[in-house]
Image (cartoon, grey):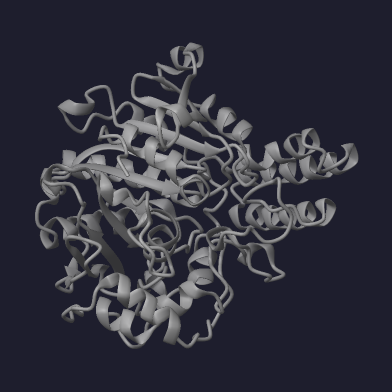
């Protein structure tokens, strides 16, 4: 590891935006059995001095000989961060970088231009960004055999990563631990959550695991793709024949999934995405009210013609890759010379293409009935949230996969009343921002005026939701 620069982090980011020269990405960018015998090694994390963050630490932890996962920990602003929750943020894709997107474009202390984020989650919680699966962001492999091909392998690597973090980052064992996620990250979070609970029960991890938050999550892909026809028809984006076309693709995917033909199902998903774009004239899947590029860089699609390689990655010419691949940032974080941030995102996706359309609903069921401490004796706290304007994961698709749960509390959940959530600068300016429906250890949030990436679209509402989930104090500006 390398010693961090003493330059103020805010000043550092702004300086890099001015001077950085874009580096060419070598590839297109992607969309969206626990094993403890693995050798877990790590570089000693590099402490990072920053005026905007009380304490930071970044480094590599190797869950196997040829796999190297990168983490970036940031300590909370609260007076006693050792008692504040620890939030692990998982980006989607698979292949989207948490240290880039989740950090600079959604919940971290600074935006990509070096400006302080008003609603950074550091006001309430400690943050842990991890570039995973291996090959994502700053993470890398020495041999292609180290890429993950299914959820069990992803979960195995993440348990090894967290075991390393327990040793590398002081104080984490006293922090209530939550896994927050977005898009494909929600599918991974469900399975990682199960693996973490099993590791705690076996004595291999000692985190105070309380809950998961599955945001606009690809938990049950077939529910998502089956919803597109009706959803777009109701919103006047397709006619009846075009709706039938979308439904036909969904039927093919369902048959292929049942036949255990994962790669073929994933290819059909890509074909459906292309068909959807053609018949709607370019509906923005991150916000169905828009066509073309989303104004927020966090949700801008690439122009790559292949629908399998679009999505959570910014254009190489935009500010985020310039910042993440700048010499000063790489030196500050201790990134090897051979590693280019985001270069292998499409490889990450390709190796997981057979698993992409598989459901994670059974993992959610397991979490709902798995206790990890006296604080969640009924089971892990499972929180689901979805932006009302999301097309990738529509609100009807979330309701549909929830009905597939075998959890004993499902009927009581469905009969529970929705609660209104108000957000505003003052009580006088509060407006209805979201709805939440809950029973026992399941809560589902519906976020108004937000698309696929809720914290980017509605930061104040996302903060209020986060603080409810983590049982922390209201935002005080």
Q: Position of residue 225 (x, y in %)?
A: 67, 43
Q: Position of residue 429 (x, y in %)?
A: 47, 31
Q: Is residue 34 left or right of residue 405?
A: left
Q: Position of residue 251 (x, y in %)?
A: 74, 40
Q: Residue at x 33, y 88 (%)?
A: 337
Question: Above or below — where is 315 with respect to 98?
Answer: below
Foreground pick, 259 / 452: 452
The image quadrant of residue 301 is bottom right
Task: Report if residue 54 is visible in the image.
Answer: yes
Q: Position of residue 202 (x, y in %)?
A: 16, 42
Q: Is residue 47 left or right of residue 405?
A: left
Viewport quadrant of the C terminus: top left
Foreground pick, 91 / 472: 472
Total numbered badges shown on the rendered structure:
0
Task: Report if residue 33 is visible in the image.
Answer: no
Q: Is residue 291 left or right of residue 319?
A: right
Q: Residue at x 21, y 33 (%)?
A: 372
Viewport quadrant of the N terminus: bottom left
Foreground pick, 259 / 249: 249
């Amino acid at each position: 590891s390398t010693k961090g620069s003493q330059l103020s982090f805010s000043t550092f980011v702004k300086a890099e935006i001015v001077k950085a020269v874009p580096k060419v990405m070598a590839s297109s960018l992607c969309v969206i059995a626990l094993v403890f015998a693995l050798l877990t090694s790590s570089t000693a994390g590099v402490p990072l001095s920053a005026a905007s963050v009380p304490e930071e630490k970044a480094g590599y932890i190797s869950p196997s000989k040829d796999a190297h996962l990168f983490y970036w920990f940031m300590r909370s602003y609260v007076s006693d961060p050792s008692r504040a929750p620890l939030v692990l943020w998982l980006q989607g894709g698979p292949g989207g970088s948490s240290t880039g997107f989740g950090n600079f474009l959604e919940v971290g202390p600074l935006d990509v231009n070096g400006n302080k984020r008003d609603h950074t989650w550091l006001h309430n919680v400690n943050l842990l960004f991890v570039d995973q699966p291996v090959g994502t962001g700053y993470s890398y492999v020495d041999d292609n055999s180290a890429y993950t091909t299914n959820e069990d392998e992803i979960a195995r690597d993440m348990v090894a990563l967290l075991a390393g973090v327990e040793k590398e980052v002081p104080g984490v064992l006293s922090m209530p631990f939550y896994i927050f996620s977005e898009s494909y990250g929600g599918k991974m979070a469900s399975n990682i959550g199960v693996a973490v609970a099993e590791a705690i029960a076996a004595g291999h991890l000692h985190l105070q695991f309380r809950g998961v938050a599955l945001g606009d999550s690809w938990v049950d892909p077939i529910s998502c793709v089956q919803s597109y026809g009706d959803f777009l028809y109701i919103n006047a984006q397709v006619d009846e024949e075009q709706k039938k076309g979308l439904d036909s693709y969904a039927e093919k995917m369902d048959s292929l999934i049942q036949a255990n033909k994962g790669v073929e199902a994933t290819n059909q998903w890509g074909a459906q995405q292309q068909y959807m774009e053609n018949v709607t004239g370019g509906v923005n899947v991150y916000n169905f009210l828009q066509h073309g590029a989303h104004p927020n860089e966090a949700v801008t699609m690439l122009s790559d013609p292949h629908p399998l390689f679009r999505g959570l990655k910014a254009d190489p010419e935009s500010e985020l890759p310039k910042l993440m691949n700048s010499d000063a940032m790489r030196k500050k974080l201790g990134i090897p010379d051979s590693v280019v941030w985001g270069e292998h995102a499409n490889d990450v996706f390709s190796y997981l293409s057979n698993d992409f359309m598989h459901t994670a609903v059974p993992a959610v069921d397991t979490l709902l009935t798995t206790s990890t401490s006296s604080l969640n004796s009924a089971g892990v706290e499972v929180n689901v949230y979805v932006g009302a304007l999301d097309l990738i994961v529509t609100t009807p698709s979330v309701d549909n996969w929830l009905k597939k749960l075998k959890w004993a509390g499902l009927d009581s959940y469905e009969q529970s009343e929705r609660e209104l959530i108000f957000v505003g600068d003052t009580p006088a300016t509060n407006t209805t921002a979201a709805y939440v429906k809950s029973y026992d250890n399941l809560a589902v949030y519906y976020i108004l005026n937000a698309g696929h990436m809720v914290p980017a679209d509605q930061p104040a509402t996302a903060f209020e939701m986060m603080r409810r989930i983590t049982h922390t104090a209201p935002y005080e500006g």
